[in-house]
Image: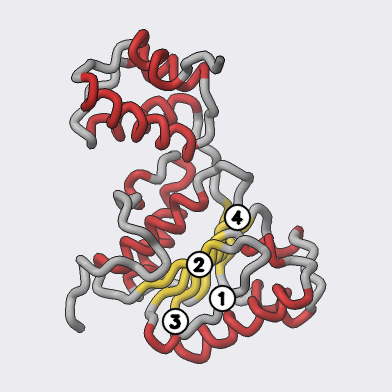
């Protein structure tokens, strides 16, 4: 198969790709290994990853797509919003990732759409990764056939990272951008802003831009001025 490492997974923009290695948490090593195997084509046909909000599921879903592309597999990504049901053509894909499938539950049209996608994926041999805030048994699925389809594959829970792991992630992501984030500045970010992984990564992005523009180091006063300016 021709290698497609540079190909952007369908449904994802061109921002810096998240990585499976960046999915933190010692309890999530098995989850990462399971996803890596699936995305490379040697693992489970269907995997459902569930966890509380802001536990990093979307990061994992996006990272899985990019990892699949690095392995030369054609990957598609769909962020479920509970309103729009895209028409999918699975014949051009090796991997399909559906993020936030819980938004479709208890909606007849949405559940039927997901039921059809799962069937198509199985028929065409497309690896399917699903994410949700809860395990299938707790999603309140109203379509019996869909409930059985969600039980086809492996169901695994994502563990929320500890505070120490979040601090490590902040410092590591800053370093990847050529920045040095002192421990006291990382702790300041964690203690004064939103603590979910997505918000922490957004903070690093914001600091990266501000530091380059101002040619300033990431001291606590500078971090405060960039991230926590008082609103007039």
Query: In the figure, 195 relative to 132: above or below?
Result: above
Q: CA distance from mark 3 to mark 1?
A: 17 Å
Q: CA distance from mark 1 to mark 2?
A: 8 Å
- Which badge, 1 or 4, is on the more N-terminal residue? 4
Cβ atoms at labels 1 and 4 below 8 Å apart:
no
Relative depth, front residue between 219 and 176:
219
Cβ atoms at labels 1 and 2 below 8 Å apart:
yes
- Residue 125 at what x, y percent from top left? 44, 86
Q: Secondary structure at mark 3?
A: loop
Residue 142 placement, left or right of 78: right
- Which residue matches tag 4? 50
- Residue 114 at what x, y percent from top left? 64, 76
- Which residue matches tag 3? 126
Q: CA distance from mark 2 to mark 4?
A: 16 Å
- Which residue matches tag 1? 86
- Which badge, 3 or 1, is on the more N-terminal residue? 1
Label placed on residue 78: 2
Q: Quadrant for residue 201, please give it.
A: top left
Q: Secondary structure at mark 2?
A: strand
């Amino acid at each position: 198969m021709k290698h497609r490492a540079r190909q952007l997974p369908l449904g994802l923009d061109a921002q810096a790709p998240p990585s499976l290695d960046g999915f933190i948490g010692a309890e999530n090593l098995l989850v990462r290994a399971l996803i890596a195997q699936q995305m490379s084509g040697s693992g489970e046909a269907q995997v459902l990853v569930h966890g509380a909000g802001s536990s990093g599921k979307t990061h994992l879903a996006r990272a899985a797509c990019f990892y699949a592309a690095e392995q030369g597999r054609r990957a598609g990504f769909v962020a479920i919003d509970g309103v729009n049901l895209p028409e999918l053509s699975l014949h051009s894909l090796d991997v399909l990732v559906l993020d936030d499938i819980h938004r479709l539950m208890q909606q007849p049209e949405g559940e039927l759409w997901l039921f059809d996608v799962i069937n198509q994926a199985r028929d065409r041999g497309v690896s399917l990764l699903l994410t949700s805030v809860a395990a299938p048994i707790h999603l309140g699925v109203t379509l019996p056939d869909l409930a059985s389809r969600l039980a086809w594959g492996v169901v695994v829970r994502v563990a929320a990272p500890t505070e120490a792991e979040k601090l490590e992630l902040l410092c590591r992501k800053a370093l990847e951008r050529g920045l040095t984030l002192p421990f006291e500045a990382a702790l300041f970010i964690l203690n004064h802003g939103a603590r979910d992984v997505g918000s922490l990564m957004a903070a690093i992005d914001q600091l990266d831009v501000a530091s380059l523009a101002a040619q300033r180091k990431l001291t606590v006063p500078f971090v405060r001025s960039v991230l926590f300016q008082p609103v007039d």
